[in-house]
Image: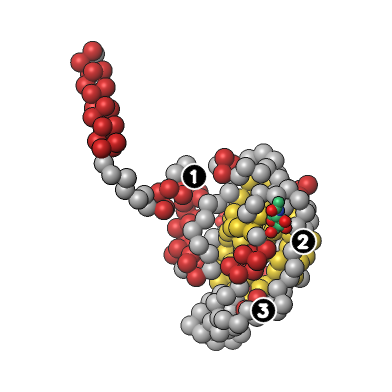
Amino acid sequence: MAVTASFLLCSILLIAGLLSAEPQQPQSPLITIFNGASTQQLDLIYELHKAEIIPTVLDEFIPQYTIDATWSEKKNITAAYGNTLPVSATQEAPKIKLTRNQNSQFVSNPRPQLTLIITDPDAPSRDNPEWSEVCHWIVTFPTSRAPTEPNVEIATEGEDVMPYKPPGPPPKTGKHRYVLVALAPLNQTTETLALTPPGERKRWGYERERTGLRRWMGEMGLGVVGANFIYEQDEEQ
Ligand SMILES: *[C@@H]1O[C@H](CO)[C@@H](O)[C@H](O)[C@H]1NC(C)=O
Ligand SMILES: *[C@@H]1O[C@H](CO)[C@@H](O)[C@H](O)[C@H]1NC(C)=O
C-alpha cells in the first residue's frame, strides 16, 4: 500500500517536473477550446466540419446554446444537424427554442440578448456560390426571455430584424445547406441591442461571394454561441 502510494507520488512529481521543464508548447486550439465541452457539443462541431459549414460559414466556436427549430410538430419537421427537409414543409417560419447548455461557465453574462439567423452559403449552388450567402432570417429575442439556468428552454417569440424567407433552392442546383446560428453580444452587455438588417439578402448586401454572416455579426458586435443545419433541394435535379 505504502509502496504504491509513494510510487504514485513519485510519478506525479516526475510528470510535474517534466511538464514544467518542457518549453511551453502551443496547445491545439481545438483542445483549448473544447476542454470541458460535452460529447453532444463535440458531435455538433464534428457535423459542422463534415458539412464544411466550418470553415465556410463559421469559425470554430464553443456551443453554449442548443437550437431547436420546429416547422411542424405534428409532422416532426425539425432541424437535426444535417437532415434533409422538403421545401414544401418549411414555408412558414419555424418555432425556435434555445436551451442553455451545461457548460455555462463560458457565459459570464447570464442574460444576453440572443439572436438567431438562417443563412444559405450555397446560392445559387454549392459549386457556384456567387450570390452567397443569402440571408433567410434574422430574429432577435428580448433580453428578459434569455434563460438564466442551464438546460432551461426559452419558448421564444422573437422580433424580426429581417423577416423569414423560406428556402427556395432553384431547380438543378443540388442540395443547399441552410445554417441556423445563435448569436450573443461579444461584450456581454445586458442592454437591448439596436440591430440593423443587412442591406440585401443576397450576399447579405456585401460585394464578395461567400460573405454574409461573418461580416454582419462583426459589425453588430455579435459572436456565435450555437448552430444547427438542414439540407433542402428542389425536386427537379
Ligand atoms: C423526428 O425527427 C428527428 C430528426 O430527423 C429524428 O431524430 C426523430 O427520431 C424523429 N422523431 C419521431 C418521433 O419520428
Ligand atoms: C456592446 O456591444 C453592443 C453591440 O455591438 C453595443 O451596442 C454596445 O454599445 C456595447 N456596449 C459596451 C458597453 O461596449
Mark 3 or mark 2, earlier in chain: 2
Q: Amino acid at mark 1?
A: Ser
Q: Which residue is mark 2?
A: 194
Q: Secondary structure at mark 1?
A: loop
**Quarter containing the N terminus:** top left
Question: In the figure, residue 108 lies in which quadrant?
Answer: top right
Tell me: 223 left or right of 127: right
Q: Which residue is mark 3?
A: 205
Compare residues 149 and 40 and report the one nearer the observer: 149
Q: Amino acid at mark 2?
A: Ala
Q: Are marks 1 and 2 in contact (CB under 8 Å)?
A: no
Give coordinates of residue 209: x percent, y percent.
55, 81
Q: Could you tell me which residue is drawn at 44 percent across and 44 percent down?
A: 35
Q: Is residue 81 visible?
A: yes
Q: Secondary structure at mark 2?
A: loop
Q: Are marks 3 and 2 in contact (CB under 8 Å)?
A: no
| Mark 1 nearby-residue class (10 Å; few <14, some 14–19, many ≥20) | few
Mark 1 or 2, closer to the camera? 2
Question: In the figure, residue 171 lies in which quadrant?
Answer: bottom right
Distance of mark 3 from mark 2, alpha carbons?
18 Å
Q: Could you tell me which residue is drawn at 26 percent across and 27 percent down?
A: 13
| Mark 2 nearby-residue class (10 Å; few <14, some 14–19, many ≥20) | few
Tell me: 79 left or right of 48: right
Q: Which residue is mark 1?
A: 38
